[in-house]
Amino acid sequence: MPEVILSYQSGLIIAQRRSSTRTLVRDISFTLREGESLALIGETGSGKTMTALSIMGLLPENVTQQNGRILFCGGELSGKKDIRSKLGVEIVYIPQNGMEFLNPSRKVKDQLFDNLEKLGVPAKERKTAAMEKLAAAGLQPPESFLEKYPFQLSGGEAQRVTIAISACSRARLLIADEPTNGLDPEAKDRFLRHIDTLFPNAARLFITHDIAVAEKCGRLIVLCGGKFIEGGCSESVLRHPNHPYTQALKDALVENGMKETPVVRESDSDCPFYSRCSKACERCLGEIPHQKRDGIEWRCVL
Ligand code: SF4
């Protein structure tokens, strides 16, 4: 059995506002093994990005995590200092916008060389190693990218440079936040292939609202309003959604007619989908029925 790389329990992730607090994520937990891909899916505001940020110790200043527990390769991640020492080395992050991630005043080669130096690659070997990573990220010919500044790259090239930089690491955990936003289906496939090539053994966590990406991950977890909705093998959850919210996500796809789920009632239920669910009834105002299937708990059996 492959090693467990990440064992995550969110506890409560809470935002402090001027005179009130708001719970952004509640009791989400999962494990991720070496070589495994897991997608967290849901709409904007579902809690997936806050979950990812909490793993990396990058929650905004007004947001705190209570009673959470994060084990990385069997050891507890204790505090921001500990997490940040692993960022870019054992835990790598691929953001939505590669251009924002890159340092605008430094050439591509310098940004690659920085990471290679951290890995202990001798100076005379760094150029070859950098070109190997650029080529594996689909940038051809790689030498033509070394001398460029970020502003000389297209959006797609910037994202691939970001992947190449992230691959100059000993990554055990890869976190990618909406990495395929704005890409056509062919470019999405290419992106996922590059990730497979460059991070063959890393545990991979994809934050996405893109069902096509989630489909390609072995497992997925659906989030709504910061709560766990359902999860399991991607293929079976997406083929036979148990939860009305997952069905609504599928119905909203272009190929399924982009059906909307309008707000129809005041939300007064523990169910985060209550205000828009066409199946809601009196029972949804009490304790929400839930079951366990294949060892994974999922909610709502109405
Ligand atoms: S608990 Fe009720 S409101 Fe929530 S998804 Fe199930 S049927 Fe819909």
Image (cartoon, rainbow, N blue to C red):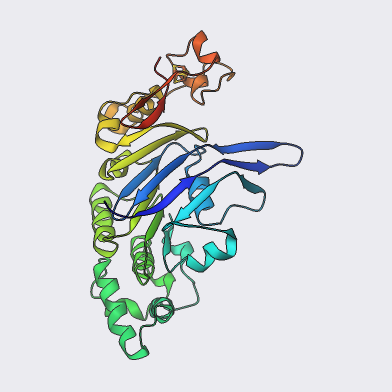
Instruction: State ligand 1's quadrant.
Output: top left
Q: Which of 99 and 59 is in front in this view?
A: 59
Q: Residue at x 56, y 45 (%)?
A: 68
Q: Picture coordinates of residue 27 (x, y %)?
A: 52, 37
- Note whether 248 is above or below 16 in the view shown: above
Residue 230 shown left or right of residue 50 in the figure: left
Q: Position of residue 131 (x, y in %)?
A: 28, 78
Q: In the figure, 111 relative to 228: above or below? A: below
- Residue positioned most to the bottom: 124
Q: From this viewpoint, which residue is outermost toward the top?
A: 282
The foreground one among 246 and 65 is 65
- Residue 296 seen: yes
Q: In this view, does 191 lie above or below 221?
A: below
Q: Measuring 63% from the left and 47% from the top, which residue is drawn there? A: 64
Q: Quadrant of the C terminus?
A: top left
Q: Residue furthest right?
A: 19
Above or below, 176 relative to 152: above
Is residue 180 in sight in this rendering? no
Q: Which residue is located at x 35 percent, y 53 percent?
A: 204
- Residue 257 x/y as whole percent: 31, 26
Q: Quadrant of residue 117?
A: bottom left
Point 56% across, 19% down: residue: 269
- Which quadrant would residue 147 be assigned to in this image? bottom left
State the count of labels: 0
Residue nearer the viewer, 152 or 201: 201
Front residue of 98/201: it is 201
Tell me which corner region of the image, top left, top right, bottom left or bottom right, holds residue 20: top right
Looking at the picture, how far across and down is residue 62, in whole percent?
67, 49
